[in-house]
Amino acid sequence: MRFFEDIQIGQRREIGSHTFTAEAIKTFAAKFDPQRFHLDEEEGRKSLFGGLAASGWHVGSACMRLLIEDGRRLTQEAVARGDKLAVWGPSPGFRDLRWIRPVLSGDTVSFVSVIVDKRTSGSRPGWGILQATTTGTNQRGEEVYSITATAFVPMREAGG
């Protein structure tokens, strides 16, 4: 992963796509969000969603998996180049989670993350704080998901 100094506001990262199948929607819902419109096609059609809808938590979980996979890919590329790696810290949280439109069975959502703010940490010397907004867009070009998350990122000078 990159160091704080290597990241610029406005930087865009395409992190991947996920297709939501009826089986996966039902499996996730049965474990974590067992509402009728996530579990049954007919109930989904009768709902405001108009079809079997993925739980918003399912959409967020798919996004998180893609973020982690993309981070691993970037790390492998950096190692192959012989770059020094920045080991990011935890996230102190997120804000503005929005489920904008329903994600229905068969939809493919593509996720993009954009750096919207960065600052040095006042309480943790050697660390910066990034904010990124990640959005998900379906195959029709409609935005369906958005979240702004924060992460601690080490500064190069602190890394030696």
Image (cartoon, rainbow, N blue to C red):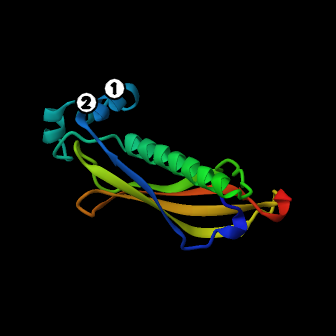
Q: Is residue 28 above or below residue 134?
A: above
Determine if residue 125 is in view: no
Q: Are marks 1 and 2 in contact (CB under 8 Å)?
A: yes
Determine if residue 80 is in view: yes
Identify the image quadrant of residue 100: bottom left
Q: Residue at x 72, y 54 (%)?
A: 85
Q: Position of residue 11 (x, y in %)?
A: 54, 70
The secondary structure type at the circle numbered 2 is helix
Q: Is residue 109 left or right of residue 148?
A: left
Q: Is residue 54 left or right of residue 68?
A: left
Q: Residue at x 28, y 48 (%)?
A: 103
Mark closest to the chain's N terminus, 1 or 2: 1
Q: Is residue 67 left or right of residue 37?
A: right
- Camera-side residue: 147 or 159? 159
The secondary structure type at the circle numbered 1 is helix
Q: Which residue is mark 2?
A: 39
The quadrant of the picture occupied by the C terminus is: bottom right
Q: Is residue 3 left or right of residue 104?
A: right
Q: Which residue is mark 1?
A: 30
Q: Residue at x 38, y 45 (%)?
A: 59
Q: Amino acid at mark 2?
A: Leu
Q: Is residue 86 above or below residue 21?
A: below
Q: Residues within 10 Å of mark 1 (few under 14, many from 20)?
A: some
Alpha carbon separation for disc pair 1 and 2 = 7 Å
Q: Report how many numbered discs are placed on residues in the image.
A: 2
Q: Position of residue 8 (x, y in %)?
A: 62, 72
Q: Residue at x 27, y 35 (%)?
A: 38
